[in-house]
Amino acid sequence: MGTPPPEIAIIGSGLSGLALALHLSAKGISSTVYEYRPSSYSQGGEIALSPNAVRVLDHLGICTELAKQGFNSDTVTLLNRSGVELGVLKQGSLFGYPSLRLNRVFVREALLKECERRGVKIVFEKEFVRLAEHDGKVKVVFKDGEDVSVDLVIGADGLRSRVREFIDPTAKATYIGTMILYGNIPAEILDAKMGNNKERLPMPSMLFGKEGSFTIWPRDPDAREVGFFADLLLPDRSREEWEQTGEDKEALREMLEKCYCQGAWPEQVQTMIRSAPAEEFRIWPVNMVPRLTSWSSPSKKIILIGDAAHAITPSGGQGGATAFEDAETLAYAISKCTEDAKLLEKWETHRKTRVQEAIDFNNLSAKVRKASKYTAVQWTREWFIWSVLKIKGAEGYRWLYGYDAVKEMAKL
Ligand SMILES: Cc1cc2nc3c(=O)[nH]c(=O)nc-3n(C[C@H](O)[C@H](O)[C@H](O)COP(=O)(O)OP(=O)(O)OC[C@H]3O[C@@H](n4cnc5c(N)ncnc54)[C@H](O)[C@@H]3O)c2cc1C
């Protein structure tokens, strides 16, 4: 008889937790997902999935359906705030898959449906509170007093991970000083406000100015809903105050107007801000988790993935993508770790390097996006964007968007 498969508890049914459970299931390994929220919960808003994220979903067989529900694109046009093109970032099918922007609800529904089809067990309203390793097992304790003992615990419990407290209690999520404000405007309202003969910005496009950056990116296949998001610099506040900030929709519009409805900002940007339905405004105060020395316990029986291990800034759109990559690669490492005792260690080293590269890319992108009151700084940034895109060309981003978990794991 061979070694029995490990008993695995995954804490958190977010993107990484569900993707891991599915990739494990595809390898014939069962796991149980524990989620503190009810099954009906779904985080709203949109998500942009770059080709490296879409590839992981395709390996699960759910990419074709999702692609029908979102806006597919191959490029993002970068412009300055006067609407002058700085370059085009190629993201899409050059790397095998399109970039996809869609309602998050669709991604979650697709993952949950696939879990149901494959018989993945998810226990909702089960809040993880603590764990302890003993006799080669990990005892996982929930808020309702129940516990389970398993061979492996995966902390896929997001930005404010409780599992992380057992790996590095000092690593707390911290606000980075930037809030992102999201909105949507129906294309027909935009058309009515602007008139049909007015020149439109390409979609998707990202505009950079002294005041920050403003991105236009539809969320549905036919671009009937033109989404946008903008960076705003705001001091930190308490949880309640953030909630109030998010609820005062007209104050949010004023913040946008103050930054982006002035000077050279294109008429389309200003019209979108002034005419978008305020009730759709949502905010995201951006947090980061400091770099962890380790993503796992010394025994490798407790492992972190996704935001729990490395919540990163959204400027490069890689938070969800790296969470998906973690999931697919870890499923492979777990499935082969009886053949190679060092595989989980190699997985962690590989993923830390990969994620750090994505973080460096994101940080650079965040620097370029950040508001600066100095015109000279802004000109330098514009020149930087133009020259980087020229020098690097599309192939310069293959390392990021062309990442294929299956091929990478075969190299370890
Ligand atoms: C507004 C917003 C927009 C974003 N846009 C993009 C984007 O366009 N592209 C992109 O790539 N990324 C984006 N991201 C980042 C991306 O959403 C995250 O990187 C990704 O969701 C991380 O997945 P995860 O599974 O690690 O964590 P999460 O998706 O946060 O899932 C964690 C899960 O754990 C559960 N949980 C937490 N604590 C416990 C507990 N104690 N017990 C049981 N369950 C628990 C939570 O309820 C949750 O379901 C965005 C994030 C936000 C907030």
Image (spheres, rainbow, N blue to C red):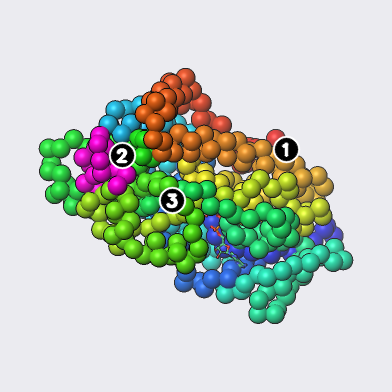
Label 1: which residue?
412
What amino acid is found at the position of numbered circle 1 in the picture? Leu
For mark 1, does the 10 Å Cα neighbourhood hold few (<14), some (14 to 19), or many (20 or more) residues?
few
Q: Residue at x 30, y 39 (%)?
A: 203
Q: Residue at x 21, y 46 (%)?
A: 271
The residues bearing labels 2 and 3 have C-alpha atoms spaced at a distance of: 28 Å
In the rendered image, residue 231, in percent from the top left (x then y), is placed at: 40, 45
| Magenta stretch, main secondary structure class | helix
Of the two numbered discs 1 and 2 on the same chain, state the one appearing first in sequence.
2
Secondary structure beneath label 3: loop
Position of 55 relative to 399 (above/below):
below
Q: Residue at x 75, y 67 (%)?
A: 131
Start-end of magenta stretch: 258-272
For mark 3, does the 10 Å Cα neighbourhood hold few (<14), some (14 to 19), or many (20 or more) residues?
few
Label 3: which residue?
234
- Magenta stretch: includes residue 326: no
* Label ID, residue 203: 2
Secondary structure beneath label 2: loop
- Magenta stretch: includes residue 260: yes
Between marks 1 and 2 in the image, the one whose residue lies nearer the viewer: 2
Q: Is mark 3 within 8 Å of ligand 1?
A: no
Q: Is residue 261 visible?
A: yes
Q: Is residue 66 visible?
A: no
235 left or right of 275 in image: right
What amino acid is found at the position of numbered circle 3 in the picture? Leu
